[in-house]
Amino acid sequence: MTVVRAWVGGFGFAKVGANYGPSLLATNEARARGFHQILWLYGKAGECTEAGASNFFVIWKTREGKKQIVTAPLDDRLILAGVTRSSVLALARERLAGEVEVVERKYTIDEVIEASAEGRLIESFASGTAYFVCAISLIHHRGRDIEVPAGKSGEGAPITLRLKNWLVDIKYGREDHAWGIVIPEER
Ligand SMILES: *Cc1c(COP(=O)(O)O)cnc(C)c1O
C-alpha cells in the first residue's frame, strides 16, 4: 500500500484534520511492527519530509567532514512549519555556530543510507509540540535498518540533547529568554 501524506499544491503545511486520517492508518501498521512513527518520503527520489506529525532532522558529517543539521525546506509548502522546528533551528544557528551548520534543503533517504554506510550519520531527531525533541535510534526502510549510532537512549545523542535542554530551560522559565515570559501564579 502506498500512502501519501502531502503533496506540492496541497495542504501539507497546515494543521488540518484531513492530513491525519490516512496517516493514522499507516502509523498503526508501523506500531504493529514495533516502530513509533512513519518517516514520510516524497516523490520518486524519496525525499525525507516529516516523521509522523513532527518535523524530521538528521545530523551528519559531509564527505568533507563538516557537521550539519539538515531538515527539509518549507518553500514548496509540503512541510508544516513547526514552532519547535523553527525554535530548534534558531537555537542551533545561534548556539552551535562554528560547530554545526544548519541546512534547510531537500535530501533523500538514499543520502541518509549513504551517510550511515560511510559512518557519517551522527544523530537524528524529530520535533513537535507533542513529542518535543525526540532522538531517533533506528530508521527502517525497505527491509533495511539504518541504525543511528548515538540515538539509542537520548543521552547518547549529545547535539539533540543540548538543543532539547536549551528549549526545556526556556520553556520552563529556567533561562531568562525573549521566548519565555514567567507569569506568577495567583494564590
Ligand atoms: C504539529 C505538526 C508538526 C510540529 O509542529 P509544532 O508547531 O512544532 O508542534 C510537524 N508536522 C506536522 C505534520 C504537524 O501536524
Image (cartoon, rainbow, N blue to C red):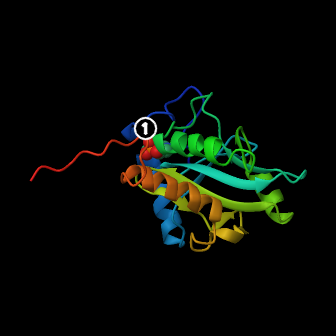
Closest to the observer: 169 or 59?
169
Q: Secondary structure at mark 1?
A: loop
Q: Residues within 10 Å of mark 1 (few under 14, many from 20)?
A: few
Q: Is residue 114 above or below residue 92?
A: below
Residue drawn at 49 percent across, 59 percent down:
27
Tell me residue 61's x, y (percent).
Answer: 81, 55
Q: Is mark 1 within 8 Å of ligand 1?
A: no
Tell me residue 55's x, y (percent).
Answer: 55, 47
Asked whether, in this view, residue 134 is left or right of residue 145, the answer is left
Q: Is residue 40 above or below residue 138?
A: above
Tell me the residue that label 1 is attached to: 178
Asked whether, in this view, residue 81 is left or right of residue 138, the answer is left
Quadrant assignment, res 161: bottom right
Residue drawn at 74 percent across, 49 percent down:
68
Tell me residue 87's x, y (percent).
Answer: 51, 42
Asked whether, in this view, residue 119 is left or right of residue 7, the answer is right
Amino acid type assigned to the residue bearing label 1 in the image? Ala
Quadrant assignment, res 47: top right
